[in-house]
Image: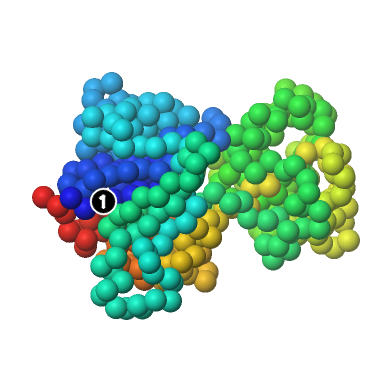
Amino acid sequence: MKRLVVIGAGPMGLEAALLGVERGYQVTVLERGQVGESLRDWGRVRFFTPFAMNVSPRARALLGPGGPADAALLTGPEMIERVLLPLSASASLAGKVQTQAKVVAVGRARTLRRDLAKNPLRAGRPFRILYEQGGEERVLEAELVLDASGVTRPTYLGVGGQPALGERQVNLHRTLGSVERALPGWAGRRVMLVGHGHSAAHAIAWLAELEQSAPGTKVTWVVRSLNARPCVEVASDPLTERAATVRRANELAAAPPPWLTVLRKAHLESIRGAGPFEVGLSGARTVEVDGIVGLTGYRPELEFLSELPLEISAVSEGARGIQQALANVTDCLKAPALLPKDLESGEPGFYLVGQKAYGRMTAFLLENGRAQLETIFRMVGGQK
């Protein structure tokens, strides 16, 4: 029986594991934290897509009639409690999901990155996965490895994506869960929000709610865009949750109320202090604030894959084939089906899957990720 190691126990990792079990693989899932770790810091943010779009029929069958309704828009914590934890404890995956298991390195047994390039002998050697768990280092071998560890490293706030001076020394809020926990302490104080993606759109709505309950709260919203409506809107967007979130944020930006200052085409240059902060911006501007929210996107962790000759996109830091196939796609609902060649990693038997395969691109949907998994298993063949 061939062995499959899945890195990450989020929605894509568990779907990959279920498909691997169905195809007859000996499956092990390694999760650096708890099941659904990245979703734990979503706070009350809901999926833009309904539940029916976010799970496969095989997962739905395991959940049974007690699972969420097809139209439900779950929060991250709800997805964990109602879907991921039951799946990880199901008969299909029981004993196969190891938590608090941090992958340190993935390579080929007895093979360096430069060895046997394009040689079938390389593909004949198993993968060696070194991981830490319970204070010990452990090793697994596998014929197939799927990295579904997501994009977890926040991008820097400074000019050109570099750290602003002092940024690495201060405590910033980089996730919506962190923002939600901090909100009560910001009542009547000064807050800076940096970024204009979907996460920032959620955050500005929460800050608007805070100001209504605590008049005197002041917010400075820093965006790189010159647009009056900085958050990208999809015409006739069928995802009503996404449309409402973006519309609310853009309405605030286009006609800022007295408590909100929007600084466009602005770049962070420095952060001084430990709270309150003195923030230096492009154009010789200086703003003093009590809290800083940095929601400028995330990037994948690639260091533990450094001994694999992966074809990583210089643009997205995800799979090069996917970036090239989706280079002009701006709406995840309109992403074309990926071809097998788009999913090749450069290392036979190893695949980036889910959001990690897309890297810093924003065109990812869970249903697209599941289609990606089906294609991969057709490529590598099943064991039944």
Using the rendered view, name the quadrant where residue 71 is placed. Answer: top left
For the point 54% across and 49% down, which residue is it?
152
Q: Answer with the quarter of the image where residue 28 lies.
A: top left
| Position of residue 258 measured from the top left corner of the image (x, y, whole percent) | 80, 38
Q: Secondary structure at mark 1?
A: strand
Q: Position of residue 26 (x, y in %)?
A: 24, 45
| Location of residue 382 in the rendering, given as x and y in whole percent from the top left corner | 16, 54
Q: Nearer the viewer, residue 132 or 78?
A: 132
Q: Which residue is mark 1?
A: 3
Residue depicted at 75% across the width and 52% down the height: 168
- Residue 298 lies, with reference to residue 78, above or below; the image says below
Q: In the depicted view, which residue is nearer to us: 101 or 19?
A: 101
Residue found 39% across the figure and 76% down from its top: 115
Q: Is the residue 106 above or below the residue 139 in the image?
A: below
Q: What is the crowding at mark 1: few (fewer than 14 residues within 10 Å), some, or many (at least 20)?
A: some
Q: Is residue 100 above or below residue 318?
A: above
Residue closest to the eye, 74 or 18: 18
* Amino acid type indicated by mark 1: Arg
Position of 346 compared to 221: left or right? Answer: left
- For the question of whether residue 229 can be seen, the reply is no
